[in-house]
Amino acid sequence: MPDSYLVDSNVLISAHRVHYPFSTRIFHPFWQALEQASSNGVLLMLDVVYEELVLNPTSNNQPDLLSQWTESVFKDKVLSRKTDEILAAYVAVQDYLVSCRCYTQHAVDLWSEESKADPWLIAAAKVIGAAIVTDEGMDKPTPRQPIKKEPKIPDVASAFNVQTCTTRQLLDDTRLFKASTYPIQPSF
């Protein structure tokens, strides 16, 4: 189990929009557990992920609840990608995408924008020894069947021996919630 986890924006976006909306009180402990993990230095956020969540305006140019929460929780704890070590690892990720021949040029181009968080997450996780929390699954591309769509974090991370996990695995690994047996007894 790693000491720290870098969160991908898709985890927080899907939690906010689909699984654990802020507006539902029963889900507040989920968000509070993430706040505690951030406070303890277990859950980290890379600057490019922070920018995706906080600086990108919504359709009405107003920050949404997730943007406000992210700024409140991570504002003074954002990990900068602008270090020599992370930059070198980022270049290695970009080189790998071309040299592995598992991705078409179009797929490689999708990760070539500096504002694209995924390759930076892999580079930073490699340098600091963190796992990446993402809800992306693996595509398992091969040179014989290169992928035309965007690379997936778990596929590329595995090439760099960077661990990935889902939100559920994060919660289980870090014991952000106490495990207990549910007493199966209908309450009606």
Image: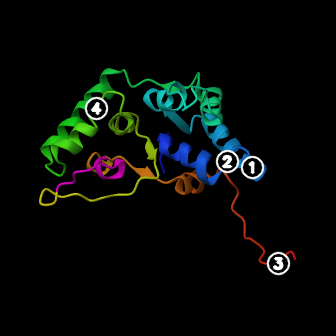
- Element under disc 3: loop
- What span is in magenta? 146-156
Q: What residue type is disc 4 on?
A: Tyr
Left or right: residue 134 versus residue 23 is left
| Location of mark 1 (residue) | 24
Q: Relative to residue 112, is residue 8 drawn left or right?
A: right
- Tell me whether circle 3 and circle 2 mark residues in contact (CB < 8 Å): no
- Our reading of the magenta stretch's main secondary structure is loop
| Amino acid carrying mark 3 in the image | Pro
Residue closer to the observer: 84 or 81:
81
Q: Which amino acid type is shown beneath numbered disc 1? A: Thr
Decide: is 8 above or below 113.
Answer: below
Q: Position of residue 184 (x, y in %)?
A: 77, 77
- Which residue is at 70% across, 44% downward? 22
Q: Residue at the front extreme?
A: 60
Q: Earlier in the sequence, mark 3 or mark 2?
A: 2
* Mark in front: 4 vs 1: 1
Query: Is any part of residue 144 visible from this angle?
Result: yes
- Report the mark closest to the observer, 4 or 3: 3
Q: Is residue 7 visible?
A: no
Q: Could you tell me if the residues under marks 2 and 1 are in contact, i.e. CB atoms within 8 Å?
A: yes
Q: Kindly report the distance in space between the C-alpha atoms of the residues bearing marks 3 and 2.
A: 26 Å
User: Does dot 4 land on a helix, a strand or a loop?
Assistant: helix
Q: Position of residue 98 (x, y in %)?
A: 15, 41
Front residue of this view, candidates 43 and 3:
43
Residue placed under numbered mark 4 in the picture = 90
* Mark-to-mark CA distance, 3 and 1: 22 Å
Provide the residue designation for mark 3. 186
